Structure formats: C-alpha cells, structure tokens
Amino acid sequence: MDLTVIGMISGTSYDAIDAAAADFSLADDEIVCHPRGLYSEDVSDELRARIAAALPPHPTTMEEVCRLDTELGRLFGSVAAAANDHLTGGSGDLIVSHGQTVFHWVEGAHALGTLQLGAAAWIAEATGVTTVSDLRTRDLTRGGHGAPLASTLDALLVLGDEARRGSLNLGGIANITVRDGDGNVIAYDLGPANALMDSAVSDATAGAERMDASGARAARGTVHAALLDRLLAEPYYRAAPPKSTGKELFHADYVRDAVGELEIGTDDLLATLTELTARLVADACRTHELTELVVAGGGVRNPTLMRRITELAAPARVRPVDDFGLPAQAKEAYLFGLLGYLSVHGLEGTIASATGARTGSILGSLTPGATPLRLPEPAVVRPRRMVVK
C-alpha cells in the first residue's frame, strides 16, 4: 500500500527536531521511497538546557521527567503539523516519532531498557494522524540493543551488492553497519562522534557555543597524544558487537575525568576528540576490510572530522549517503519513516544479527489520529532492497 509517511528524530545533540516526509510503496520484495523533503525546527535554549540537566550523570525528578515528556510531545506535535503542511500539503498518512532519548540502560554486554520522551498522543492530537512511537523497546524484549536501528535502512539501501561497504552515521554517537564474511548484517555503536565535541565546546564557553562549527577549533588545535591514549583506553571499544552506548557513558564529566591533571587548551582538546572519532572509524574500516564507507549524519558538516576520517580510512573510499539518493542530514528521519511503514504492514523493522536479538521485531506502539485506526493489509514478503526515486 502507498503511504505518505513523516519520520521524526531529535538526536543526542538535542539541538533540533528533524521531520522528513516520503512516499513509500511496496512491490514484491522492493520498497520504493520518494523523498518529499526535510523540515527542521531548533529546540529552544531553555528546553535544551533542561534536557541537558536531566541527562546522566545529573540527578533528576519524576516531576521533571513528566514535564519534559509533555513539553517534548507538544513540540514534536507542532513540528509534525508544520512538516505535514509544508511537505505534503496536509496529506500525511502516518507519523513516526523516535522521540528524545534520555536514557539507554546498558549493563555489560546487554541493553536492559531505553527511554525516549515526547508523548505520542500530543503528536496525534496536533496532526490528526496515526502516530508510531517507542520504536526501540520491542527489540530489547528479545535480547537486542534496540540499536543501531539504522542497520535496517543500511541493509536495504547501502549494502545491497557485493562491495565491501560500510554505512556510518556520525550523530552524537557514531554507529556503523557492515556485512560479515557470511553476508550477515552487523551493526554497532563505535563510540562518540559529536557528543564529546559538543559538550567540550559548551563546557569551555559556558554554553555560549554549542559545537565546534565547521571543525574550526579542531583545525587550529594539535592532537594531545597523552590524552588520546587515555581516551582510546576506554574498555567499550574492545567489547565485541552487538553493543550500544550513549551519553550515559560519554558525557561532559567523562572528558573532564580523562583530562585530569593535563594542561590542554580548548582547541587542542577539540583536535584530540576529533582524532578519537576518526581513529575509531578507521579502525572499524580495517577490521571489516572495507573498500567503501558511506557517511551520513550531522558530522558530515564538520570538514575537519571528515578530512581525518578520509585520511585514516584509506584505502577505503569515503562517500556521502547522498550518492544513494538520501540527503545525509535527513537520513535518520527517513529511517524512522521507513520503520513505521514496515510496522503498519506487519513487517519486522530490525535485523536480529545487527541488534543482537533472538529474532527480528515489528516495532513501535500505535496512537490513533482523528479517525478510527485502519491498518493496511499485512505484507507477505519481507523487502530485500529499497530504491529511492
């Protein structure tokens, strides 16, 4: 069934909400995606500060969690309504909201829980459109990490031929999807990308700056070898996939603890954190013997980071996901649109080998819109590829 779907995401940087609209259709084992554009709205400084104050390692209260869930739900609802107007002329059939992750509970090799705020009822009420939310939890119930969910889109769009290709997302956390020697899809969080860089800049400027814009500070700085060695000693990097992480581990205090007694300027700190991410990516390219690396996410707008990844990942060729038809900035929003489309057709949205689950799962919870809930007839064939037209 053809559906116009709006996928929404607020990432680990929680600086904006992205909403991407696309027409999806399914023919036999092929999904066709026709992108209709991206609509974004910034998160206010006041709300960003409150989200940051509620994240680990800070304490919070159930009152504040309740307030944030409501206020984020209202904000997501407002963005969804505007995206539906601007991108589809009000013709959206389905909205899929990832929400705002505030905690991802991992102990050892196992993910035990995950929490995304932004109550879906506010979205359905603001738009009158059926809304899919809570897209990670079902995978956790089957032993998976609920991440990286990008592996589903990656497998359909990027890893569809015999090339030794990897798909990398540079958000707050960097994650990668590859195929192993037997053709199985493997995906996991590499470690920090923008998360530590953003927190270091905000910390150094007392919040006056949110990020290392265009990688300018890192470009001026020099990598501090001793600090880089300390950072690379993190045990997470040596854990075998499947694995997932987030700001529960990689937060501002993590950087302060690593710096310790070392004397290091802000630009040198940013150069070192940038080098850390580039090293993690390059190590993965060598481990999986990649000849190509397809990159998406906010990190592609950091030329210093991209230059170091390109240099260190060689001989693997680095190219943007735009070459496959999706804009790098909007990939995650389109991903959630795809996952919602699969869910309402009764199709699994996860790949068990990628998340570590026992089996794949049909993802999400459904909140009806202004009319009675009517789902398409279940699909009988799991799609094997996606094309963008």
Image: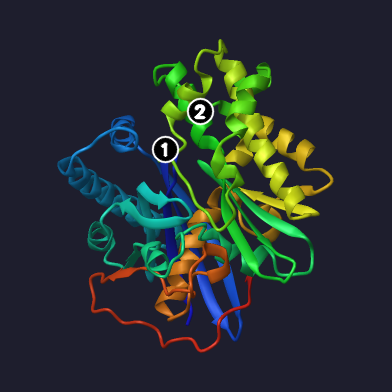
Compare residues 265 and 213 and report the one nearer the observer: 265
**Lateral position of residue 285 relative to residue 383, left or right:** right
Question: Residue at 40% of width from left, 77% of height from top?
Answer: 344
Question: Residue at 78% of width from left, 60% of height from top?
Answer: 164
Judging by the rendered image, the residue that carries numbered circle 1 is 15
Q: Are marks 2 and 1 in contact (CB under 8 Å)?
A: yes
Where residue 252 appears, as percent x and y from the top left, is 43, 28
**Where residue 45 is drawn, which disc sits there?**
none
The disc labelled 1 sits on which kind of residue? Answer: Asp
Q: Quadrant of residue 289?
A: bottom right
Q: Earlier in the sequence, mark 2 or mark 1?
A: 1
**Lateral position of residue 37 relative to residue 308, left or right:** left
Question: Residue at 28% of width from left, 61% of height from top?
Answer: 127
Q: Does residue 1 show up?
A: yes
Query: SS at mark 2?
Result: loop
**Lateral position of residue 199 relative to residue 388, left or right:** left
Vertical relation: 308 (above or below) 364: above
Where residue 194 appears, as percent x and y from the top left, is 53, 36
